[in-house]
Image (cartoon, grey):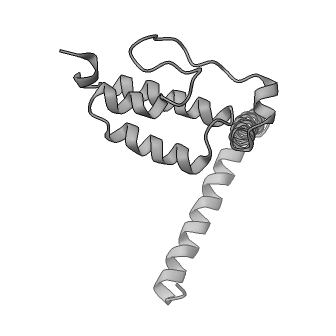
C-alpha cells in the first residue's frame, strides 16, 4: 500500500499541528489560515490529507518522514510574531500567578503555625468565632434575611 493512502494516527496529526503552530510563530501563516489548517488536520484520515497542509511550508517536512522535536523559536523569531508574543506573555503571567499563590499560601501557613505555638488558646477562639458566625447565619435564614 502506498503511504499516501495509509491511515494517519493521532500522533501524526499532532506532529502536523505542532508544525503548523511553529509556522504561525515564524510568521509563515496568519491566524485564520492556521485555524483552517488545524481543523483540516483534526479531520484528516490519511497521510496525503496531512501532507497537503504542510506542502507550501518548505522548511517543514511532511509527517512520517522525519520525526524530530519542533524547533524552539529564538528571541529574534519571537519578535516577528505578535501571536507568539501574546502566548509567551500569557505563559509568564500564569507562572507568576502560581508563584505568588504558592508564596502567599506558604506565608499564611507559617503565620498560622506561629500563632498556634505562641497562642495555643487561639484554636479555641477561632472555634468560638466560627460558631458565632454559624449561629448568625442560621438566625438570618430563620428570619428570612436571605
Residue furthest out toward the bottom: 144
Answer above or below: position of 39 versus 125: above
Question: Residue 86, located in which quarter of the rendered image?
Answer: top right
Tell me if 70 is positioned left or right of 79 in this view: left
Question: Residue 43, located in which quarter of the rendered image?
Answer: top left
In the image, residue 6 lies at what x, y percent?
Answer: 23, 21
Tell me if 47 is positioned left or right of 84 in this view: left
In percent of the image, x 68 and y 40: which residue is there?
87
In the image, residue 94 lies at what x, y percent?
Answer: 69, 40
Answer above or below: position of 138 versus 40: below
Tell me if 102 is positioned left or right of 141 in this view: right
Quarter occupied by the N terminus: top left
Considering depth in this image, is 43 or 84 the residue closer to the camera? 43
Considering depth in this image, is 46 or 146 the residue closer to the camera? 46
In percent of the image, x 23 and y 24: which residue is there?
5
Count the numbered circles shown: 0
Considering depth in this image, is 49 or 107 the residue closer to the camera? 49
Question: Residue 112, located in which quarter of the rendered image?
Answer: top right
Considering depth in this image, is 2 or 146 the residue closer to the camera? 2
In percent of the image, x 46 and y 84: which residue is there?
142
Q: Is residue 41 visible?
A: yes
Answer above or below: position of 116 versus 137: above
In percent of the image, x 26 and y 33: which residue is there?
45
Tell me if 4 is positioned left or right of 95 in this view: left
In the image, residue 73 lies at what x, y percent?
Answer: 70, 24
Residue furthest out toward the left: 1
In the image, residue 115 lies at what x, y percent?
Answer: 77, 39
Q: Is residue 109 visible?
A: no
Amino acid at each position: 500500500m502506498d503511504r499516501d493512502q495509509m491511515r494517519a494516527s493521532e500522533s501524526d496529526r499532532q506532529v502536523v499541528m505542532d508544525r503548523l503552530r511553529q509556522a504561525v510563530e515564524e510568521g509563515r501563516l496568519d491566524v485564520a489560515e492556521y485555524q483552517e489548517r488545524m481543523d483540516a488536520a483534526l479531520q484528516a484520515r490519511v497521510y496525503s490529507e496531512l501532507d497537503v497542509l504542510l506542502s507550501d511550508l518548505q522548511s517543514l517536512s511532511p509527517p512520517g518522514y522525519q520525526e524530530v522535536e519542533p524547533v524552539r523559536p529564538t528571541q529574534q523569531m519571537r519578535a516577528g510574531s505578535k501571536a507568539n508574543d501574546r502566548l509567551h506573555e500569557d505563559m509568564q503571567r500564569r507562572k507568576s500567578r502560581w508563584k505568588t499563590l504558592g508564596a502567599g499560601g506558604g506565608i499564611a501557613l507559617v503565620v498560622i503555625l506561629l500563632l498556634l505555638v505562641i497562642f495555643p488558646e487561639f484554636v479555641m477562639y477561632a472555634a468560638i468565632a466560627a460558631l458565632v458566625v454559624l449561629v448568625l447565619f442560621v438566625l438570618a435564614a430563620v428570619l428570612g434575611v436571605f
